Image (cartoon, rainbow, N blue to C red):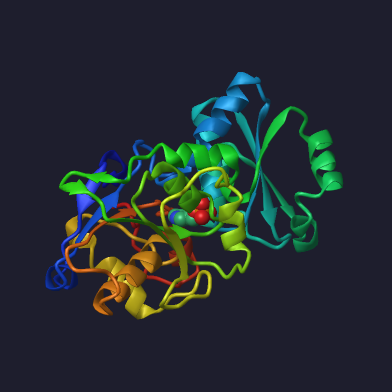
Amino acid sequence: MILTSYLQWKKLHHPVLHEHQTELWLRYAPGNNPDISGNKILKLKYQLEQALQQKSSGLLTFGGAFSNHLVATAAAAAENKLKSVGIVRGEEVDLDNPTLALCRSYGMQLIRVSRDFYRGRYQQDILQQLGDQYPGYLHIPEGGTCEAAVQGVSELDMCATPDGPASMLICAVGSGGTVAGLIRGSETTPVLGIAVVQDQSLPEKIRAFLATDRNWPEWQLIQALHQPMYGRFDQQLWQFCLSFAEQDVQLEPVYTGKALYSVFELIKAGKIAKGSRLSFFHTGGLQGLKGLAYRGLIPGADPRQ
Ligand SMILES: Cc1ncc(COP(=O)(O)O)c(C=O)c1O
C-alpha cells in the first residue's frame, strides 16, 4: 500500500515540464490515514478541536453519494472517538457503494434525504430539526468549508518547495475553502484555483474568506480547461492520471487529476512563464477511485495497491 500522505513534497517529472523548463512540486498534507489526507485533514482540524473542546456528542455533516468529505469526517470522528452522522443527498442512493460503505465502517450513521430537503440543509428550520434529532452534534457544512477550515488550510506552507520559493500555488476548487486557505497562507506568491464545479458564485464565496483590510497576493480562478463539468472525465484525462503511477503518484480524475491536466494545458499553451516553479496541492480524494470503479467508469483495480 502506498501512503503518499507520509510525503510532504514530491517533484513531478514529465516531458512537458522538461520542454517548458517548468518545475512542478506536489505538496502533500501530513497525516497517515489516506481517508483524511489532502485538504481534509486541514479543513477538519479546528472543527475537530472545537468538537472535542465543547465535548460535542459527535459530528454531523452533509454530502453526496461519493463524497470525499463524508468519508474524511467519518474517519476523523472515529479517530477521535466521536460519533458521526452523514446527511446524504438522495433517498435512492446505494448505502453499499464503496464511499458510503467506508463511512459506515467508521461508524457513521447515514441518513438519506430527498434532494429538496438537502437543498434546504442550511435553513434555520432544517438545522433546528437536525439539532433536535441529534442534540449536541457539531454541524460541519458540506465539503467542510467554513472559517475554521480556511484557517486550517492556511497553515500549510505551500510557498517554500525543497528547491526554493514557489512562483505559483495551485489547487483544485470545489466549494472554495481550500483555495481561500492557500491565499491566506501566502505572503506574496500568486495563487491559481482551478474550478472543477460549475458555480458562478465561487469568486464571491472565496472573497468572503479574505478580509478587506489587507492586501492579498494576486489570485485567479479559472474553470478546468478539459471536461469542465463536475465529475465528467474522458479516457484522455484518465490516462493522464495513470501516467504518473510510475512516479508513485496517484491522481483521481474528478479533482486533482482534472486540475493538474489544466496546469499542463496552460504550460503547453505558454501561459505559464518558463522557469516557473509551481507548487500544486495534492488534495487527496483517492477513495473516490473505488466509487468510479464501482460505477464502471474506470477499471476496477484497488487504487491503493
Ligand atoms: C480531493 C478534493 N480536492 C479538492 C477539493 C476542493 O476543495 P474545496 O471544496 O475546499 O474547494 C475537494 C472537495 O472537498 C476534494 O475532495
Return the x and y of residue 279 as percentages of the image width and height. Answer: 29, 53
Q: Is residue 33 visible?
A: yes
**Viewed as shown, does residue 56 lie left or right of 182?**
right
Count the marks: how many? 0
Question: Which image quarter: residue 85?
Answer: top right
Return the x and y of residue 73 as percentages of the image width and height. Answer: 55, 40
Question: Which image quarter: residue 28?
Answer: top left
Question: Which image quarter: residue 224?
Answer: bottom left
Q: Residue at x 65, y 20 (%)?
A: 55
Q: Is residue 96 visible?
A: no
Identity of the residue furthest to the right in this view: 125
Q: Residue at x 37, y 44 (%)?
A: 187
From this view, report whether residue 183 is shown above or below residue 263: above
Of residue 202 and residue 105, the one placed in the foreground of this image is 202
Return the x and y of residue 237 as percentages of the image width and height. Answer: 35, 74
**Viewed as shown, does residue 49 lie left or right of 30?**
right
Return the x and y of residue 255 as percentages of the image width and height. Answer: 44, 62
Q: Residue at x 37, y 40 (%)?
A: 156
